[in-house]
Image (tube, rainbow, N blue to C red):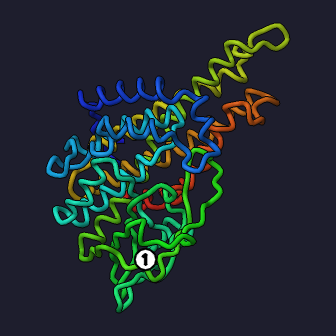
Amino acid sequence: MSSLVGNVALNFSEEQSMLLDVARAFVRDKAPIDRVRAQLETEAGYDQAVWQEMVDLGWTGIALPESVGGSALGFSAVVPVIEALGHGLLGTPLMDTTLAGQLLLRAGGAAQESALAAIAEGEIATVAFLDGADWGADNTGVSLDDQGCLQGSKSFVGSAQVASRFVVVGNQGGEPLLAVVARDALSDDALVANTLIDLTKRSARIDFSGVKPEQVITGEAVVAALRDYRLLGALLAAVEATGAGARCLEVIVDYLKTRKQFGKLIGSYQALKHPTVDIYCAVEDSRSFCYHAASIIEEGGLSADAETACRMAKTSAGDMLVFAGDRAVQFHGGIGFTWDCDSTLFIRRAQWTQQVFGDAIHHRKRLASLLLD
């Protein structure tokens, strides 16, 4: 592996350990699965009081500099928090807000101080990236006209229903740009909510036509920041999936240890034991890939090693959760297909994870160029 990949660093800092412990305890106490289920069909998809407690803990500013009210712990410190949220299947705007902050920070730097300070204080922000559903496309279809207004729409904008600030990816004269749009600038009918397979998630299609952004960011830094945004997003999606996979494994093991068939615990049958061990190994592989990527993420532009690590993490975690979710449903038998069984939540999260920030085929194609060309 070392001769092929190069950098195989794997670090787990004291700060990451503390954040993981705190986040796990928080999710266990504040968001048990019955409370998560209670939010599945609400408009926001999460408890506002729980979100405010997360803000009060400083999680929205973990990776932001102290000059804007952040903790300056670096992007790697976000990873254990997202893993814990994934373990609880807790849907909140934290991932979208964190990525929006990173995109602004990397593209605009100190000039984005006011926006970054608002995010650190708990303002919900999100990136309007996709023109359609292709993570491999340029996705700069929204244009800025001569009057300084945007023209075009974006699809599957995460946390759009609750966001106060949108970072819109577009172009002017063929050159990429970021347009910062306040929620108040959008008309009432500009946002159309999507129906998603993962009911803990929220997204919408937004028509930005005729909207004048409060700020436009251009230049070479935008191109590099967009590249980093895709990779950091892929990593956080992988981290969340790893947490969900670990929780899925716990649910499977608990069932295998209690359910009896033909007078024997079903966990005694090899046909169920072997796939369960496969899930355990896949979860640990995914966690190693994720924390390896976190170990080599830089505050500046991401290196080729970091890109490789992020893509490997996304590929591993996505495949792992699909397998774990499928086995959870199958092992539970008939009840596993019902709404009352938590297995359905894992397989829904798996389908969402596979697609967001590119599926396994998307990343393997790019890994082939990185590793073999």
Q: From the viewer's side, name the closer residue of 310 and 153.
A: 153
User: What quarter of the picture does the N terminus occupy?
Assistant: top left
Q: In this rendering, is residue 298 above or below 263?
A: below
Is residue 353 at least partly visible in the picture?
no
Residue 309 image point, x, y percent: 36, 48
Task: Using the image as rendered, state which of residue 58 and residue 142 is in the foreground.
Answer: 58
**Residue, disc 1:** 140
260 lies above or below 200 = above
Q: Residues within 10 Å of mark 1 (few under 14, many from 20)?
A: many
Q: Residue 35: x percent and y percent?
A: 57, 31
For the point 47% across and 44% down, the residue is 92
- Amino acid type shown at disc 1: Thr
Q: Position of residue 41 (x, y in %)?
A: 65, 45
Most distant residue in the top direction: 263
Q: Is residue 132 shown to the viewer in this render?
A: yes
- Position of the C terminus, as image quadrant, is bottom left
Identify the residue at image location x=57%, y=71%.
189
Q: Position of residue 305 (x, y in %)?
A: 30, 52
- As drawn, is 38 to the left or to the right of 139? right
Residue at the spot 23% in from the left edge and 50% down from the top edge: 298
Quarter holding residue 219: bottom left
Judge left or right: residue 251 versus residue 208. right
Could you tell me which residue is drawn at 47 percent across and 28 percent down?
A: 30
Q: Is residue 288 above or below residue 99?
A: above
Q: Is residue 220 left or right of residue 82?
A: left
- The picture quadrant where one finds residue 78 is top left
